[in-house]
Image: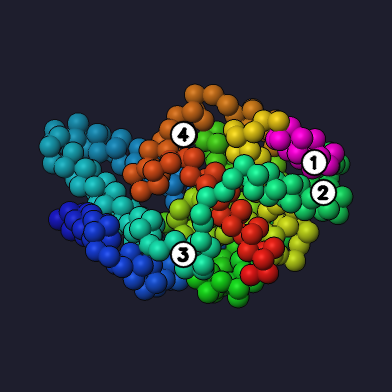
Amino acid sequence: MAGAVLLALAVLWLLLSRVVPGMAQWHSQSVYRLTAGVLGRFWGLFPFSAAEICLYILLVLFFFTLIRGLFRAIREKNYKEEGAKWLSCWFLTAAALFFLYVINCGVNYQRDSFAVQEGFITEGYSDEELARVCLWLTDEINGRSDLVERDEKKEMGAGEHVQEEAAAAMEALGEQYPSLEGSYPRPKELIFSSLLSWQNLTGVYSPFTVEANYNGDITDYNIPFTLCHELAHLRGFMQEEEANFIAFLGCVNAKSTEFQYSGYLSAWIYAMNELNDRDVQRWSQIRRQLSAQADLDVRANSAFWQRYEGKVSGWSEKMNDAYLKANGQEDGVESYDRMVELVVTYYHMKHAGV
């Protein structure tokens, strides 16, 4: 009964957010702000990813209760009653988790976009404009590539305090953009980051604990951008292209040279991929202008992900694509790439003095 009530409330709330104008925006600024504040502060007390630990505990409990129930059913020869107890327990668990997902994530997919709230009006862009932005990003990267900290492999190092720096960068960004204002918790590295690597994921937002989790195994230049991306989700901006753009803004406006470099290089990869699809010749000309140090980081990143290519990563990408489309992102996993349009708009506004 309790599970059915929670499930019904979650489904009703999700449907209403899609058909009632303004409801999702009201939810994100009131209900979600309250639940995120309470859950985020509580789970933020733990130095590790509570979502990851809870996942392992749930898996252990699932199989433990299943085996215990089977033994009881065999001993007492009461299969229906024991089966009903077990199914009832896990139905309630699933309903509670789905309710948390809807409240802390699902409804926010329907809220007003960051671009609309903060005045980033996108109108498309030409191949010439894209090439100009790629050149600008290349110059910004090259100007910082020999200033960032580098390890023994001559690759960029994120530093020991990258988590605190990410929270500080997002809090500073909130002073410029009201929709992002407030305090941010420290992002948390997963204990078994390889679980994300096999899924081709750099990070993940947990709506159950309101935590920003990230893959600690990825190339270091990716880490600042990833942390800011996941923290953007904590502000209720679930659209992937918007979280990417907010991460870009958070990084390039940060005090840390490593964060600036991470933001520009991450945007450069998205923009250059788009340019490669449109004009290979221009792409080749600009690609050769990237500094040797930055080129080393790009190649290290490619080599890292090549190790995880296979059926698991392909299956995970299909699942992520279906999930995003189910939540209104028609481009699926390609929605990450749509940040390029926002970066082009930012470039024009920046050079127009806005």
Query: Regarding mark 4 in the picture, which secondary structure is present there?
Result: helix
Q: Could you tell me if the residues under marks 1 and 2 are in contact, i.e. CB atoms within 8 Å?
A: yes
Amino acid type, callout 4: Ser
Q: Position of residue 46 (x, y in %)?
A: 55, 62
Is 15 positioned to the left or the right of 227 in the image? left
Question: Disc number at residue 116?
Answer: 3
Q: Quadrant of residue 1?
A: bottom left
The residue depicted at 67 percent of the width and 30 percent of the height is 280
Is 234 positioned to the left or the right of 104 in the image? right
- Badge 1: few (under 14), some or many (20 or more) residues near its Cα, within 10 Å? some
Separation of marks 2 and 4 at Cα, in angstroms: 34 Å
Q: Position of residue 132 (x, y in %)?
A: 70, 48
**Stretch in magenta:** 282-299
Identify whether 123 is placed above or below 318. Answer: below
Q: Could you tell me if the residues under marks 3 and 1 are in contact, i.e. CB atoms within 8 Å?
A: no
Q: Could you tell me if the residues under marks 4 and 3 are in contact, i.e. CB atoms within 8 Å?
A: no
Name the residue tied to disc 4.
316
Is 187 positioned to the left or the right of 31 in the image? right
Q: Residue furthest top?
A: 311
Mark 4 or mark 3, whichever is nearer to me: 3
Query: Regarding mark 3 in the picture, which secondary structure is present there?
Result: helix
Question: Disc number at residue 290?
Answer: 1
Q: Earlier in the sequence, mark 3 or mark 1?
A: 3
Identify whether 3 is placed above or below 45. Answer: above
The total of numbered circles placed on residues is: 4
Q: Earlier in the sequence, mark 2 or mark 4?
A: 2
Viewer-proximal residue among 299 and 159: 299
- The quadrant of the image that shows the C terminus is bottom right
